Image (cartoon, rainbow, N blue to C red):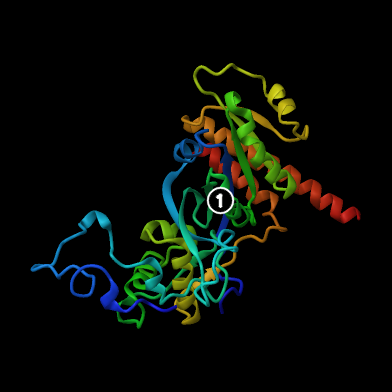
Amino acid sequence: MGFAPSDSTDLALKILVAGGFGVGKTTLVGAVSEIKPLRTEEQLTAAGTDVDDLGGVERKTTTTVAMDFGRITIREGLSVYLFGTPGQDRFWFLWDELAQGALGAVVLADTRRLTDCFPAVDFFEHRGIPFVVAVNRFEGSRSFQPADVSRALDLDTATPVVLCDARERASGKDVLISLVEHAGKVHAARVLAQTRS
Amino acid sequence: MAYPPREYLPGTPFGYPPPPERPVQWYDEDAGPMVRPYALTKGRTRPGQPFDLIALVVTDIPDPTGLPVGPEQIAILEICRGNALSVAEIAADLDLPLGVVRVLLGDLLDAEHIRVSRPVPPALLPHEHILQEVIHGLRAL
């Protein structure tokens, strides 16, 4: 019982959509899937260690974090779930859970504020999670070549950089397709490395 | 911690305003349900088993209304009947915090009312043909 292999062959894949505040994460998730807001109640425990001893009264602060989340049904029994990561820095601890078992991530970037996506790039690099950088083209932003962005972010040359318009469904689909293709390559390379060692 | 004797508090008779003649309606429908989320879980914040965000939950129970479970758990059983839903979807559909839903699911799993399929383990990304299927599916969207 419990987590024993289910007789169903349902498969769920998780893709994260990360990036700085206001870069278009919600827009992208909404363009390719039916979006739903997801609430979590999180306990913030870091603060309050040096305050008065409250004598057994546990000091817990809960905060509600809202995330965007959408589902794309590929076929019956095979779905892709998209999760927009919370933008604020203080919710970093949520990323670990979100990243667990993720197929890969889309890091949305705005060339007017490229530094905003540095934390997300660092996070996925350190955890070895395949990701693509999608440059959301905002009106009024200068057009950059993907190679420029790749150099500015100091990305591994294998990490794809694509241009997109997060409002467009077709564009969002292309971003996801490039991620799945990239994740497949990364995975195949890892399997090969394991069999050689 | 010692409280000061009541008579030392300012105001009349014990420092509290007199009760209103009629109950004051100080909240309206916009306040939402006046039950704190974890009251639904009897104060528990951790389920017996971890539930991944995309673990899929399904039930075969045709009619959950007679079961000794709470209304939120009946709602879970109703939306998951013959239709696998992820933990995240259940939380979003019922508009309940994820932590609460995980505890409620833990009870349902212990009582064997639901089946939960573990998501693909991180180390075992799905086979290439699955990824190809996903790519084709995305193209066809």
In the figure, is residue A14 to the left or right of A127? left
Residue ID at (34%, 68%)? B75
- Determine the residue located farthest toward the left in the rendered image: B21
In the figure, is residue A152 to the left or right of B10? right
The quadrant in which the C terminus of chain A is found is bottom right
Question: Measured from the top left, where is residue A52 in percent x and y?
Answer: 54, 67
Question: How many neighbours does mark 1 have within 10 angstroms: few (below 14), some (14-19), or many (20 or more)?
Answer: some
Query: In this rendering, does residue B86 appear at all?
Result: no
Residue closer to the observer: B35 or B22: B22
Question: Measured from the top left, where is residue A45 in percent x and y?
Answer: 56, 62
Please count the marks in the image.
1
Question: Measured from the top left, where is residue B86 in percent x and y?
Answer: 49, 60
Question: Measured from the top left, where is residue B88 in percent x and y?
Answer: 48, 58
Query: In this rendering, does residue B51 appear at all?
Result: yes
The residue to which callout 1 is attached is A91
Residue ID at (14%, 70%)? B19
Q: Does residue A143 sit above or below A93 in this rendering?
A: above
Dot 1 falls on a residue whose secondary structure is helix
Q: Mark 1 lies on which chain?
A: A
Residue ID at (71%, 30%)? A153
- Determine the residue located farthest toward the right in the rendered image: A197
The quadrant in which the N terminus of chain A is found is bottom right
Q: Does residue B47 sit above or below A165 in this rendering?
A: below
Residue ID at (54%, 44%)? A88
Q: Does residue A94 sit above or below A186 in this rendering?
A: below
Amino acid bearing label 1: Phe
